Image (cartoon, rainbow, N blue to C red):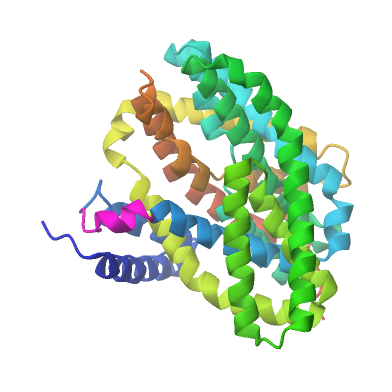
Amino acid sequence: MLVLGILGSLALLLFLGWILGRIAEYFTLPSLVGMLLAGICLGPYGLNFLNQELLDVSPALRTVALLIILLRAGLSFAKEDLRKVRGVALGLSIIPCLFEGVTLLFVARSILGLGWAESGVLGFTLAAVSPAVVVPAMLTLHSEGYGQDKQIPAMLLAGAALDDVFAITLFGVFLLFATGQATSVLWSLVQLPWNIMAGILGGFVLGLLLVQGFRRLPVKDWEKLLLIVIAAVLFWELGERFAFAGLLGIMVMGVVLRERSSAFAHRLIAHLSGVWLVAQIVLFSLVGAQVNVGVLWQAGLMGIIVIFLGLLGRSLGVWIAISSTNLNVKERFFCVIAYLPKATVQAAIGGVPLALGLESGELILAISAMAILLTAPLGAVGIRKGAPLLLEKKSMV
């Protein structure tokens, strides 16, 4: 069997991801559909052409790609836009996640026969929306003028950036129960507000430091871009080490850079847009490579039913979270669609229960893989096709 070196594997992944992405666009599908398929085909559960060293660093590469798009998101939205939607965005980051997770807890307990703790692990493995799908889609809609009058892209983007903090925290809580370490649960819950506030404050301070540094140092734009990406990676690493919301902080850092240096921010957006063209292929192709299609049969029809019922719970949560807004019915329905996709979080944590020896680990991994394959394309297509039908378009004159 042909297994390429790490550089050859990356080159082949980029090439096939680009080709299949363009084919998907030809059939009016989002390019990420083709990129996911490229990863599945070339990955260890497909043709197995990818070098293991590339797969070993896959989480790091996916993280860098995600940081780039979140940084671009922060640079693209004015502080006032995000301030107007902060209350609704906070609701969107908590309520849909809780509704889906709790729905799946009871569904897994009653339909799959799992214990309460393992049902919670499954529920909050699936309860996170994918910022990798939602954020770039909202940036595209923002640039095209869809939903701008009511700040819908900003609202959904900010909620998606924070949603995974709650999902992963509650996943960790139920995992502690499932592995017999329940004494750490209270501390995990107490840390949650700290995670969010520390991420926001840290991103704000880091943004200010970068702005002041750029004013004092004679550095070119590409050097500033390099320093910003390095700072974002290190900040995220600190967030992982000290348990604060690093992804949210990076978006805040981008907002600060925009507010303090608007002209530079617009130039940086142009640079990051070019980088994202490559980064998105790396991100979604490597997510596809993590999908173990071999275990999908274990989920079967029951897996589809479980995922569908969870999405019903999430959709109800979204509807409640935006109930206090002035959105009309069509716009609310769009918000429900936009919060369907799952990908990065499930690819990252779907295999953790199996690695820790949980009896239901293989089933959780199988349903996670199925959720990615079903909801990432469904949500991406729904956003792309639904926006012109459901949202008002602001004149870009």
* x then y, percent, for residue 258: 79, 71
The residue under the point 10% across, 56% down is 1
Side of 162 relative to 150 (left or right):
left
Q: Is residue 127 magenta?
A: no
The residue under the point 62% across, 47% down is 239
- Residue furthest to the left in view is 1
> Foreground: 119 or 143?
119
Part of the protein shown in magenta: 48-57
- Total labels drawn: 0
> Foreground: 119 or 328?
119
199 vs 122: above or below? below
The residue under the point 67% across, 46% down is 245
Side of 161 relative to 113 (left or right):
right
* x then y, percent, for residue 327: 84, 47
Examine the rendering and report whether any part of residue 382 can be seen. no
8 vs 379: above or below? below
